[in-house]
Amino acid sequence: MDFHVECEAEEDGRWIGEVPELPGVLVYGQSADEATIKAQTLALRVIAERLEHGETRPQSVHILLTAA
């Protein structure tokens, strides 16, 4: 699984971080770094919940989080 964090500056000065491969993983931060870290954290939580609830089949998982 490869997930990419996309960060973009908002007009109000905040940064928005998103993982397009995981709908709903959308966060705000005071900097690009903070938004990236928050998006990565939320992405890992979403993946863990999907595994826990059987929504994703357990397999060899390789997770690569990169900032775009």
Image (spheres, rainbow, N blue to C red):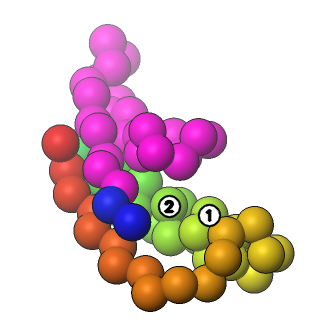
The percent position of residue 64, horizontal first and vertical second, equals 27, 68
The percent position of residue 29, horizontal first and vertical second, equals 38, 44
Q: Is residue 26 left or right of residue 6?
A: right
Label 1 is placed on what type of residue?
Answer: Val
Q: Is residue 62 above or below residue 23?
A: below
The percent position of residue 17, horizontal first and vertical second, equals 37, 41
Q: Is residue 59 above or below residue 2?
A: below
Of 59 and 14, the residue lying toward us? 59
Secondary structure type for disc 1 = helix
Q: Residue at x 50, y 70 (%)?
A: 44
Disc assigned to residue 58: none
Label 2 is placed on what type of residue?
Answer: Ala
Residue that label 1 marks: 46
Of 13 and 3, the residue lying toward us? 3
Magenta residues (range): 3-31
Asked if the magenta segment contains residue 61, the reply would be no
Q: For residue 56, which quarter of the picture?
A: bottom right
Using the rendered image of the protein, determine whether residue 58 is visible from the camera's viewpoint.
yes
Contact, CB < 8 Å: mark 1 with mark 2?
yes
Residue that label 2 marks: 43
Task: Name the image quarter holding the C terminus.
Answer: top left
